[in-house]
Image (cartoon, helix red, strand yellow):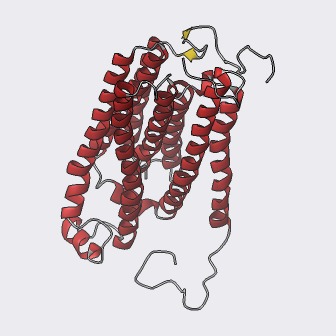
Amino acid sequence: MPEVYPQFEDIDQQQETYIVGMWAFLVNEVMFFGPLFFIYGLYAWKHNAVFYVTSHHLDYKIGALNTTILLISSWMVAMAVHYHQKNQLKKVCNMLWGAAVCGTLFLAIKLIFEWAPKFSHGLFPNPGFQSRYLAYYGADTNVDVARLFFSMYFAITGLHALHVLIGVLIFVWLIRLIKKRPDVITDYVPTEMVGLYWHFVDLVWIFLFPLFYLMPK
Amino acid sequence: MSEHTSTTNGHGDHGHGDHGHSGHHVIPQAKLLQTFFVLMGLMIATVVAARLPYEGGVKGIPSAIAWLVLLGIAFWKAGLVVQIFMGVKYSTKLTKLYAYGGFFWVTLLGVTLFDYATRQLEPVQGWEPVAESALPR
């Protein structure tokens, strides 16, 4: 059982404090990603027809595959918390490893099948974007606005991918702590907090997927 | 320190599931698995809804419906993740306040977008729109 620090009345209040603290951090994250979604929404509304054409240059099947992978990882993390509450540490580590693999797979698919082809075609925000876009897709839409779409695509999915990478590293770190430092991991709360972070990363993708890959006209 | 020894939190739902060693709610495996399958189903529903041919209908209305359906499903999925996977449904009132407060706060921030919807751009000298660019300045 974890030690109850003198400023808390009991273990429940202490654990609640950790969780509330984590939520305070997640509120920061909501405020960080929220305006990015608003900016995207504003331009999608102003340039709906162009965004519609440009969004079809993203493969929704890859987006759906990555959504599935993140949902599986989220379930695994929820299971890790479940097992930790029951003190089944081996199962906790297995689930966290599974989630770490899913996160890595997500990044690999994004990097290899999405970003790499876009970069090799010059479809990232750069001075030569216009000519590269015209050479690759033809004059199918307003290229200036298409550049705006791809700027936001790389900015928002890039920040999300950075969060995924941090999450994977935290999983590995947490597994190591669970195995080597039982004096540090005395209860399920660290797993719960890491889980909250990972679910938030999943939450961001739940909105990114329809907004970027499935945009209606 | 008071003599208060009972749990200080307000567990929302004691109807099912069991409790860990410290008295916190343990969400049952079956509930987590069920939530996962519902999320997968909603993901497939989003893709199917987005691939339906909306063009050719009454101008303006079909795309608005498509947006509503896609965002509606996204909010539904988000709700499931927050309530079940993140366990807010079973958490204390203080945790709920922080969790819902954050989403409420970002909604308030979104109100700033009304400025774009309701006011004209008033270009000042040097910020006129460039003829060959469709981008607003």
The reply to whether residue B34 is visible in this rendering is: no
The reply to whether residue A104 is visible in this rendering is: yes
Is the N terminus of chain A in the top left, top right, bottom left or bottom right quadrant? top right
Figure label count: 0
Residue farthest bottom in this picture: B125
Residue B27 point in image, percent of width and height: 52, 16
| Near-viewer residue (A61 or A164) | A164
A6 lies above or below A148: above
Residue A12: quarter of image: top right
| Near-viewer residue (A35 or B56) | A35
Residue at the spot 58% in from the left edge and 8% down from the top edge: B16
Residue B124 point in image, percent of width and height: 61, 87
Residue A134 point in image, percent of width and height: 24, 71
Residue at the spot 65% in from the left edge and 55% down from the top edge: B109
Residue farthest right in this picture: B2
Residue at the spot 55% in from the left edge and 91% down from the top edge: B126
Residue at the spot 24% in from the left edge and 51% down from the top edge: A111
Q: Is residue B97 left or right of residue A104?
A: right
Q: Is residue A53 left or right of residue B125?
A: left
Residue A61 point in image, percent of width and height: 27, 41
Q: Is residue B28 left or right of residue A24?
A: left
Q: Is residue A57 left or right of residue A39?
A: left
Residue A62: quarter of image: top left
